[in-house]
Image (spheres, grey):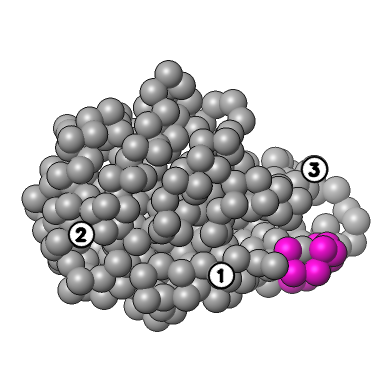
Amino acid sequence: MLPTAKIGPYTLPNPLIVAPMAGVTDRPFRLLCRRMGAGLAVSEMVIADSKLWHTRKSRTRMNHQGEPEPRSVQIAGGDPDMLADAARQNAEFGAQIIDINMGCPAKKVCNKAAGSALMKDEKLVQEILEAVVSAVDIPVTLKMRTGWDRDNRNAKTIAKMAEDAGIQALAVHGRTRADKYLGDAEYDTIAEVKASVGIPVFANGDITTPEKARHVLAYTGADGLLIGRGAQGRPWIFREIMHFLETGEHLAAPPLTEVEQILQEHLAELHSFYGEKMGVRIARKHVGWYLQTHDESKQFRSRFNGIEDPLEQKDSIAQYFARLRNGEVFAA
Ligand SMILES: Cc1cc2nc3c(=O)[nH]c(=O)nc-3n(C[C@H](O)[C@H](O)[C@H](O)COP(=O)(O)O)c2cc1C
């Protein structure tokens, strides 16, 4: 039986969430993942200091036009009042869930401890949680790591604190801050967190296959999963996992024609969302991810990365897939 994932008043269509990834989970990617079966997609983090929101980067990050409900916006910072203010303003801009970032290993955001560095200062964590929850009347969620290093895995303490403060759901990445992205994620601490609180807990870290998804759900007892890097260049991972969880059988991999169609639509969205110049640049990393499983793609990618024109990008992808379908090896 699949768990039903709820966040406050929202029942998600399914328990698979796109993990927030700065520079990746922009509106085009979130919409694409939702179309491919994700139950929710959390926005890239918005820095809490609203003095920085006039930049083009911040404005595009706060664009949620056409996104299906519920819209979850992540905020990052280290100052309780600033975070409360950011939550309030983002709720006014259309956020329906506010997610607090205590999961990102970046040392500092705006010269203040933020992200997972906050986990070291439990008193400050409490102040932040209380300030943000009382600032808005929409659900607030918390994303964190298992602790700040392996000797100090305090996720359980913070989870309890969060529940008492009125946080509606937790996402736990199975690494400590000190682990950065090294080693394998561990799921014992996530299972302990889940067993110790009554609010929904979502497990996160290294979930890249349907089997792993089933294992992590069963092992942790979590209410759902957050999937980050496993969705880069493979947004269909959500429908693959859902199919496996529901039937125990693997969905066939998408045929090349479908991969091409998804990629072309994704490119077109990036070009129109960011404008031609920036869209072309942002498209490069996504194309790299889509093609990483194809042997000959490295040669192609280095040429593709030199293209500055959106139409040329589109044509070049069409040629690449035509050659791939014909079984030709791509010659640079
Ligand atoms: C490029 C990149 C950007 C990320 N940005 C954020 C972020 O803005 N906020 C956050 O809470 N976590 C961020 N993360 C962490 C992910 O949400 C997730 O916790 C982590 O990647 C582990 O999940 P995965 O193994 O499924 O990728 C980022 C990760 C990556 C790879």
Q: Residue at the spot x=59%, y=46% of the render? A: 220
Q: Position of residue 37 (x, y in %)?
A: 61, 71
Name the residue tied to disc 3: 295
> Which badge, 3 or 1, comes first in the chain's sequence?
1
- State the image quarter where residue 198 is shown: bottom left
The residue labelled by disc 2 is 133
- Mark closer to the chain start, 2 or 1: 1
Asked if 220 appears above or below 261 in the picture, the reply is above
Residue farthest to the top? Answer: 151
Residue beneath the point at 82% across and 63% down: 248
Magenta-drawn segment: 245-258
Towards the viewer: 50 or 281: 50
Q: Quadrant of the C terminus?
A: top right
With respect to residue 245, does 112 lie above or below? above
Query: The disc labelled 1 sits on which kind of residue?
Result: Thr
Q: Residues within 10 Å of mark 2 (few under 14, many from 20)?
A: many
| Circle 2: residue type | Val
Q: Is residue 115 visible?
A: yes
Is 254 in the magenta? yes
